[in-house]
Every structure is written in structure tokens, then in C-alpha cells.
Image (cartoon, rainbow, N blue to C red):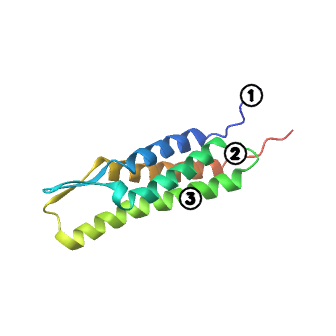
């Protein structure tokens, strides 16, 4: 039986992996040590990554609208929370004393991939039987 994956679900699965991994990696490096994403907004990105994983595994040919909506929600979470974290740190301490960690960067790039997957999935035309 042939798989019924839409062109964009692979990108959504990659984004899910980046978001799940990025949720637990260090989001910020400070002089006091790294700050894990799991103690804050990284958990929300992890949960959104699981939602993106589900969107990448369902048959998108029949449930295209649902998968596109899931991708957009995941992109908003995965882009919004890292952006909020950076703006919050800039307001608190400026540019000195901290550096973005790999979790923050992976989460944000996962959000970008979710947006690209949503765009690609929204352009898929239904297959005529």
C-alpha cells in the first residue's frame, strides 16, 4: 500500500524533531551557567513539537485543513516564545551577560519550518479518484 503523505509533511516532521529537541536544550547561556528550556517556555515548545509530530503523521490528503492549522499553531508557539525570551532578556540586561543557546535557535528554526510546511501543505490540491 502506498503512503499518502502530502509534500510538506516531511518538513513538518523535521520541524517537530527540532522543536522537541530544542525544548530541552539550553536556551540561554549566562555567566552563572546555562538555563535549560525545560524550566520555562521550552516545555510549551516541546508540547507544540508533539502536536507537529502528530500533524506530520496523519494522512494529510484527507485532513489537509487540520494539518495546516496544526502547523500554523506550532509555528506561532515555536517562533513566539523564543522571540519573547530574547526581547525579555534584552529588556532586563541588554546585550551583555548572556548568549542564546542551541535550544532557543532550534526552537525558532523549527517554527520557521512549520510555517514553510503550512504554506506547502496549503497549496496541495486534492487528488481526484
Is residue 45 depicted above or below 124 in this figure? Answer: below
Residue drawn at x 40%, y 63% as measured from the top left: 81
Residue 112 point in image, percent of width and height? 45, 52
Residue where numbered disc 2 is placed? 60
Q: Are marks 2 and 3 in contact (CB under 8 Å)?
A: no
Which is nearer the N-term, disc 1 or disc 3?
1
Residue where numbered disc 1 is placed? 2
Which is nearer the N-term, disc 2 or disc 3?
2
Residue drawn at x 49%, y 62% as measured from the top left: 76
Observer able to see residue 8:
no
Which residue occupies the foreground of this view, 112 or 29?
29
Residue where numbered disc 3 is placed? 72
**What is the crowding at mark 3: few (fewer than 14 residues within 10 Å), some, or many (at least 20)?**
many
Residue 38 point in image, percent of width and height? 36, 55
Residue drawn at x 48%, y 48% as measured from the top left: 113
What whole-number distance in Å separates the C-alpha atoms at marks 2 and 3? 15 Å
**What is the crowding at mark 1: few (fewer than 14 residues within 10 Å), some, or many (at least 20)?**
few
Is residue 30 depicted above or below 89 in this figure? Answer: above
Residue 106 point in image, percent of width and height? 37, 47
Amino acid at each position: 500500500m502506498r503512503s499518502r503523505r502530502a509534500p510538506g509533511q516531511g518538513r513538518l516532521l523535521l520541524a517537530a524533531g527540532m522543536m522537541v529537541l530544542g525544548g530541552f536544550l539550553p536556551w540561554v547561556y549566562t555567566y552563572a551557567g546555562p538555563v535549560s528550556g525545560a524550566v520555562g517556555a521550552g516545555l510549551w515548545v516541546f508540547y507544540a513539537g508533539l502536536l507537529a509530530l502528530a500533524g506530520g503523521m496523519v494522512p494529510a490528503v484527507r485532513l489537509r485543513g487540520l494539518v495546516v492549522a496544526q502547523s500554523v499553531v506550532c509555528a506561532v508557539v515555536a517562533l513566539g516564545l523564543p522571540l519573547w525570551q530574547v526581547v525579555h532578556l534584552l529588556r532586563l540586561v541588554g546585550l551583555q551577560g548572556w548568549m542564546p543557546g542551541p535550544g532557543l535557535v532550534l526552537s525558532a528554526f523549527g517554527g520557521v519550518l512549520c510555517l514553510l510546511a503550512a504554506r506547502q501543505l496549503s497549496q496541495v490540491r486534492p487528488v481526484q479518484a
